Amino acid sequence: MLIGLDAGTSVIKAVAFDLSGRQVAAAAVPNRYVTRPDGAAVQDQDATWADAADALRALSGKVGGLAARAAALAVTAQGDGTWLVGKDDAPVGEGWIWLDSRSAPTVRALRAQGADAARYAATGTGLNCCQQGAQLAHMQSRLPHLLEGAECALHPRDFLFLRLTGLRVSDPSETCFTFGDFRTRTHDEAVIDALGLRPLRRLLPEIMDGARDTAPLSAAAAAATGLRAGLPVSLGYVDVACMLLGGGIFTGTGAAGCSIIGSTGMHARCIAPGDFTPNPDRTGYVMLLPIEGRAAQLQSNMAATLNIDRLLDLAADLLADFGAPVDRPALLGRLSRWLEAAEPGRILYHPYISEAGERGPIVEDAARASFIGLNSGHRFPDLARAAVEGLALAAADCYAAMGPVPAEIRLSGGAARSDGLRGILGAALGVPVRRCEREEAGAAGAAMTAAVAIGAYLDMQACIDAWVAPLLTRPEAPDPALSALYTALKPHYLAARDALPPVWRGLAATRGTP
């Protein structure tokens, strides 16, 4: 058995796979974070470790003899964020997560400096307030007391690996898009200087490639998780890279892209380092993949299905007020009917509903969602259709910032199961889409990393052939008429997006948001 541990923002999942890639069992434990009016979004580091250990113990309860049968454990987790540890590896304060927007003024100042162009050229990544580099710079300049006693700055995944193995390290993907050069897979001192972090250079851990090296599970972690001491543990790449790997971004053939339609929206194309396409706004990410000479260039919407969730919440709240409570699954069951009932392309929707604003393909912490074009004849199905179309147009916006849309897009994430959403997304992108039927792509991508590290597969291509390629559905061609409609809508979507920032910032100032 191979175990993939995936600590997402709201759920921690432990998943067992056999060596052929078949998912055997999964266990989940809620992950908890706290938000505050000042833009803070934080997690209790020790509580997150305890929840991860509980998820692994719960998995053992579903798979007989798992401790003895496990060949390796791999860990991935939500990306970005800043989790500080000090003496005896004890947490220093709360862990900042990717939703934390307190560093927004520092990001604006750093992006305005000339050195940011060189930083972007090395990392391939636009600076935003999700990232550890921005968060450390903000702490250093405005909240220095938070750094007192800190010996190492980790990401959430790194912290869990520390608890599992006792090693303070980070992986190539997150290190290089934050502090390094994706071409060399190492730290870049000029990037660190561009962030103004020379005084904090000592906090950055060494790089460990989990596709090549593992570390043994410590005795303390074995006692906490119920697994055996000495079990090889792989530090998986950042969760998005693992999800893209498990979702089919690279199968060795064709020019494919991959979109993850989950709480956030990730839109990526597989590149060789020399194929990086910069954009003038210096946005997006380049995330190394655990494949020799391959990386994912991506743009990320802060919110994807969160937009649909909030719309359904409004419906549920209204029904509850009239004494007719209805649960989320029942409302989701209506979504396909609403999409069919509404006429396409009648309302524009920008899906910037996250409290942290937007990071792709624009970096704007004040960005907020909006409907444009409502009239007295529109009903709730029209709003639902507009929200899904907004996600699709946002995806097209993201791909356009990276060059031509790939010839085919592979979809993963829970929303990819919706026929209506796939049809709208494919039409907005103008290319065939395929769904990856892998249920837990992130945990699978992490487990694939461990599978190669322990020699269960000769290389990652062989693992992909077994674990990913058989789970891709047949291509679904876009509807030509719908594609033509969305092509006509895109200039209006972009014009509104470009015109709204002064309004967003004015609203933020009215609210007193920094």
Image (cartoon, rainbow, N blue to C red):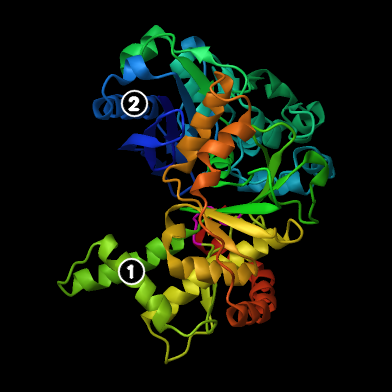
Residue type indicated by callout 1? Leu
Measured along the vertical axis of the image, is residue 268 above or below residue 451? below
Q: 377 or 37: nearer the eye?
A: 377
> x and y percent of residue 478 in the render?
59, 72
Inspect the magenta stretch and tell me whether residue 354 lies in it: yes
Measured along the vertical axis of the image, is residue 465 above or below residue 310? above
| Number of the label disc, if any, that sits on residue 56 | 2
In what element is the residue under mark 1?
A: helix
Main SS of residues in magenta: loop
Residue type indicated by callout 2? Leu
The residue segment tinted magenta is: 353-358
Identify the residue at horizontal 58%, vertical 67% (top origin). 426
Q: In which quarter of the image is residue 361?
A: bottom right
The N terminus is located in which quarter? top left
Q: Do the residues labelled 2 and 1 touch (CB within 8 Å)?
A: no
Identify the residue at horizontal 29%, vertical 24% (top origin). 60
**Residue 155 shows in this picture:** no
